[in-house]
Amino acid sequence: MTIFSKIITGETPCHKVAEDERFLAFLDISPLKKGHTLVIPKVEEPYIFNLDDEWYTSLHLFAKKVAKAVEKAVPCIRIGVAVIGLEVPHTHIHLVPIEAVSDMNFGKPKMQPSQEELAETASIIRACF
């Protein structure tokens, strides 16, 4: 069971941004930028391209709705999108508010926001749906 599966079941807490019956979006606890959100399916599939077409398409449509809310909530030029797939063996899409291409550099030091800051950011994003 991955950390993301534990988040889905509620065993591990998260700062939830959006949820429906098949997908969940929550803040990355070590973000590249404020508002960095992870979007996951509620099925434990390690590799995004192993999702069937309907799940793959629906995941991206859900991520689009989340990205629009993040864009309203967090000042940025746009929302960067990345699927790397090596950090946690559970399909996930990174949505990162960006000002420059360098904002998507996953090799740079991550932010360490407090739980209170994450809770406030999640609340602001949820209000933008």
Image (spheres, helix red, strand yellow):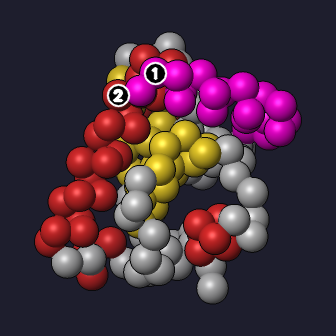
Q: Secondary structure at mark 2?
A: helix
- Inspect the image, locate mark 1, and give the three-letter code of the amino acid beneath it: Cys
> Residues at badges 2 and 1 in contact (C-beta under 8 Å)?
yes
Q: Which residues are magenta?
A: 111-129
Please say whether residue 120 is one of the residues in the magenta stretch: yes
Q: Is residue 100 visible?
A: no
Q: Position of residue 65 (x, y in %)?
A: 32, 37
Q: Secondary structure at mark 1?
A: loop
- Horizontal side, residue 94 vs residue 78: left or right: right
Q: Among all residues in the image, which is located at the extreme left? A: 53
Residue at left offset 63%, top offset 85%? 1
Q: Nearer the viewer, residue 105 or 20?
A: 20
Q: Which residue is mark 1?
A: 128
| Magenta stretch: dominant secondary structure | helix
Residue at left offset 38%, top offset 64%? 22
Q: Quadrant of residue 42?
A: bottom left
In the rendered view, would you say 118 is above or below 127?
below
Q: How many marks?
A: 2
